[in-house]
Amino acid sequence: MTVLVTGSRGAVARTLIGLLRERGFAVGAASSRPDGPDTVRCDLTDPSTFATALKGVTSVFLYAEPSRIGEFAQEATDAGVEHVVLLSSAAVLAPDAESSPVAKSHLDVEKALDASCLHATSLRPGSFASNALAWRWSLRSGRPISLPFPGSHSDPVHECDIAEAALAVLSDPALGGRPYTLTGPQSLTFTEQIDILSRVTGRSIPFREVTREEWKEEMAEHVPAAFADSLLDWWQSNDGCPVDLTPCVQELTGHPARTFATWTRDHVDDFRA
């Protein structure tokens, strides 16, 4: 069995590659920008790269890039791929998923895989714990973190839990063919996450509440306006409202989902640099 792991520069993919190799799987690391001889070029927006990357592959861990997903699914079918595990998003479950830029890109990939002949499994993480890394730039510059909805809840999930969930369904295709919504073990507000960061790092972490427009203006160089509005709408919908949690991480991995405090301890040096 050979597993192609796309997006190999990402945190989930890097962790998954290590886990697969520990289990003795043959692994092909794939990226649109290969950074070494052990990485094959697979640009999910460029179908000319698909055939070479998929040669001899039986399973794929796929990042959600919708622009050429039809061609990718067909090329994977022609190459004899037996199972595709998609890193999707819980955003596809939102009532406005079709009109949300954040959700629609994942939803379009799920639909294309469902319409193909491939055996496909969608992993739908809620909020990545690693989203907190965006705050380190404020911390390093000495500025308070800007929060438009400090009381907004999310379910931060550790990238290692996502990778281990992917390992489980890649190792046992009988678990596949259905979606799994992956969450962390706690529904936490942004302020609660900052409190945890403060305790673990041993430093005071100030924040300031800002308006939607102030946050959009501050993030204009980094987040396109349409995506910013979608994020803001999502945060506003969860303001003061705990999010639903699932047992899927434990069901797939055999252990409880890692806490945000655990994630923070694992990444403490990222906040101290």
Image (spheres, rainbow, N blue to C red):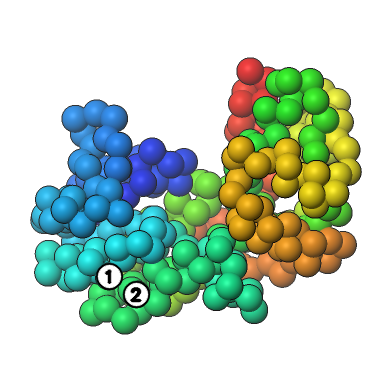
- Vertical relation: 89 (above or below) 92: above
Look at 23% across and 37% down and name the residue there: 39
Percent x, y of residue 1: 18, 57
In screen coordinates, is 89 left or right of 2? right
The answer to whether mark 1 and mark 2 are in CB contact below 8 A is: yes
**Which of the two residues, 152 or 122, is positioned nearer the viewer here?**
152
Cα distance in 3D space between marks 1 and 2: 6 Å
**Residue 114 seen from this side:** yes
The residue sitting at 31% across, 65% down in the picture is 69
Task: Please say if 222 is above or below 199.
Answer: below
Q: Which element type, helix, strand or loop, lies under badge 2?
A: helix
Q: Residues within 10 Å of mark 2 (few under 14, many from 20)?
A: some
Q: Amino acid at mark 1?
A: Gly
Classify 184 as above or below 76. Answer: above
Residue 217 lies, in percent from the top left, at 73, 42
* Quadrant hosting residue 263: top right
**In this picture, residue 186 sits left or right of residue 92:** right
**In which quadrant of the rendered view does residue 103 lie?**
bottom right
The quadrant of the rendering that contains the C terminus is top right
Residue shown at 63%/52% (left/top)?
Answer: 225
What residue is pinned by disc 1? 70
Q: Say whether disc 1 or disc 2 marks the residue closer to the N-terminus.
A: 1
Q: Which residue corresponds to mark 2?
A: 112
Q: Say which of 151 and 225 sits in front.
A: 225
The numbered dot on residue 87 is none
* Residue 187 appears in view: no
Q: Nearer the viewer, residue 66 or 114?
A: 66
Farthest residue in the top direction? 273
